[in-house]
Amino acid sequence: MSKRRTERLLSIVVLLLSSRRYLTAEQIRAAVTGYPEEHEAFKRMFERDKEELRDLGIPLETGRATQFDDDLGYRISRQDYELPEIQLEPDEAAVLGIASRVWQSAELAGAATGAALKLRAASREADGDAAASPRPGIQPRLTTQEPAFGPMWEAVRDRRPVTFDYLASGRSEVTKRTLEPWGVVNRRGHWYVAGHDRARNAPRVFRLSRITGPVKLAGPPGSVKVPEGADVRELVKDWDKPLTRDHTATLRVRAGAGFALHRWGKHVPDTENPGWDLITIAYSDPDWYAGYLAWFSPDVIVLGPPELREAVIRRLKGALT
Amino acid sequence: MSTQPRMVTSAERLRRLLALVPYVAARRVVGLAETAATFGMTERELIDDLNLAWCVELRAPEPYCPIDLSYEDGEISISQAESIARPLRLAADEASALLVALRMLAEAGGDGDTVARLIAKIEGAAGAAGAASSQVAIKIDHPNARGMAATLNAALAAGKRIHLRHYASKRDEATERDVDPMRLLVVDGRTYLEGWCRRAEGVRLFRLDRVLSVDVLDVPAEIPETAEPVDVDAGLFRPSPSDLVVELELAPTARWVAESYPCESVTVLTDGRLRIALRTPDTTWVRRLALRLGEDARVVAPAALADEVRASAAAALALYD
C-alpha cells in the first residue's frame, strides 16, 4: 500500500516537473498508475496526495490548464523545486556530519539529517575524502525535552501567536498568557521563548519548562510581526553581560576550606583567630550571594555588610527547623 | 546503524528517494554499502528504494520509464534521472535545524573557518527557508571556556596528554590530575572535556568553566581500548542504583532546584510546593544546598541527612554568637 503510494507520488513529481503546461487532475490520472476508476474516490486520493507533496515542501503550483476552460491544472516549476548549485569541500562535508547529529529530538534531528543529505546529493564532493579530513573535536548536543518546544518552534517559524498557561518562578498560581513569539533561546540546556506579551503590552521571556498544559496557536500564519531589531540573538546578549559587583563582603573563612572564596577574593591570615583567613570579595546581588555564602557554612562567617550577615543568619535559622 | 526494518511512511520514503536519486546521479557510480550507510538504511531497504524508482512509469502521453538505473556487484549507477536529477530545495525546518546546529558548533568553538564557510553556503542555498533560524539562539557558557576549548582542541588534534587543575564545586575543592583527552562535548549549553583520567583510571567529564588551568604535556595520550565514551544521548549524569535517594520539599521560590538537578521524581504539593527525589553518591552537596535554601527547603529523607543539616546550621549559627 505504502509502496504504491510512494511510487504514485514520485510519478506525479517527475511528471509535473517535466511539464511546462499546467496539467489537469484528469491528465495526471491518465499518466500516473495507481488511481481508482471511481471519480469521488479518485478526487479524495488526489487531494491527499497534493497535501502530502506540499507538506514535503514540493512547490506545487496551480493555474488554468488552458486559456479556453476554467479547469485548474498543476505543475512544479523546476526553478522553485531545485536546490541551487552548491559544492561542498571535504572538510565541509565532515562538519555537516557533526552538525546533523546535534539535535537530539527526533523531529529536528530528522530535519537536519534530511537537509544534510540533500546538500550532499547536490554536491559532487569526493566522499572518500570526508572521512580522511580531520574530525572537529567538538560535539555539541541540543535537547528539547520541554513538551512546549514543538508547538513553540512551529509558532515561531510560521509567525503565529500562541496562548498557554504559565507558572512563573516563585509563584504558586498559573496565569494565562497570549504571546506573539519572536524567537526561542536555549541557555544552559533550557529553552525560553521571547516575544510580545499582549496582556502586558510589553516584551517578555518565558521558560518553556514552566508552561503547564498545551500551547495553542491563536492566529493565522504570518500574523506575528517581529519588530525591527528584535533579533533574539541580540535580545539575550544582555544575559551574559558581566555582573556589576558593586558590593564588597568581608568574611572570615576557615583556612583550607572555601576554595572558591579564597581563589576569587583577597585573603590574608586572621591574626586574631589562628586557623582562619580574612577575605574581602565583591558581589552583585545580596540575596543571591547570601545563599551562595550559606553553602559554605560552617566554614565561613560574614562580618559585613550587616544586611548580608543578617540574610545568611536568616537562611541558617531557616535550615534549623 | 540499525539493521531492523523500520516503518517508513510514504512521505518519508519519497523525501529519501528525492535525495537518493540525485545523490547517485551526481556520482555516476557509487558503492551500495556506502550509500546505504550515508542514508542510514540497510542495503535491502536501499535496493527496495532503487527498484521503486526504476518501476516508475508514466502512461501518457506516451508510456515511458523516466528513471533508468542499475545495481550490480555492490555498485549503483543511474543513467537517466530525468527531472529529479537535482535534489529538492531545503524545507524551512530542514534549513533552520541545520543552520541552528552549525551556529551552535561555531559558538562552541568548533572548526571556525570551515563552519563559517559552510554556514554561508547553506544560507545561500536555502534562501528564505533558512530565515526562521535567525529566530533561534543558542547560548553557550562561558566565555572563558571557549579559550580553553581551543587549547584542548589542539591537544586532542596532537594526541597529547594534559595536566588539569579542576574545581569540584559540589565538594568545594580543587583537584589535579593527568588526563588523556577523548573529545569535547557541549551538553545543556555547557562545554565538557571527556577524557581518560589517569588518577581515577576511568572515563571522566570535566566542565570547562570549572577548569582552573590546563597544561599540554609533551607526552602522547594513551587511551585504553576499554575506555567507553559516555553515552551523552542517555543523559550526562546517570545515577547508579547504589546511590542514596534524597527527598526534598521545596517552596515555590526554590522551584529552580527541580529544574537544575536531575530529579527522579517531582510531585506537586499544595500551594505550589514541590516534593523531589534525587539520587546521589555523595550527600555533602545536598547538605550545603539545604543551608543555602534555608526555610525554602526541607530534607524529608533520609532522616540522618536532615539531622546533619540541622547540626550544620547550628554549628554555623554558633559562630555568629
Image (cartoon, coloured by chain):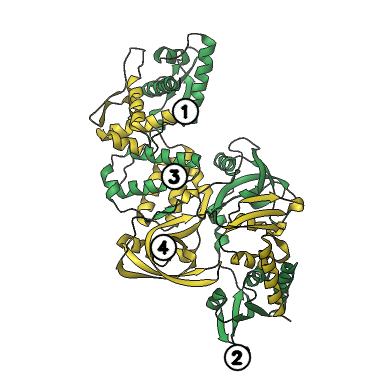
Residue designated by label 1: B9
**Kind of residue at badge 4:** Ala
Q: Residues within 10 Å of mark 1 (few under 14, many from 20)?
A: few
Identified at 47% across, 25% down, the residue is A61
Q: Is residue A184 visible?
A: yes
Q: CA distance from mark 3 to mark 2?
A: 60 Å
Q: Which chain is green?
A: A
**Chain for mark 3?**
B
Q: CA distance from mark 3 to mark 4?
A: 22 Å
Q: Evaluate whether label 1 is on the same chain as label 3.
A: yes
Numbered label attached to residue B98 = 3
In the figure, what tint was chain B given?
A: yellow
Q: Is residue A134 above or below residue A27?
A: below
Residue designated by label 2: A271
Q: CA distance from mark 1 to mark 3?
A: 22 Å
Q: Residues within 10 Å of mark 2 (few under 14, many from 20)?
A: few
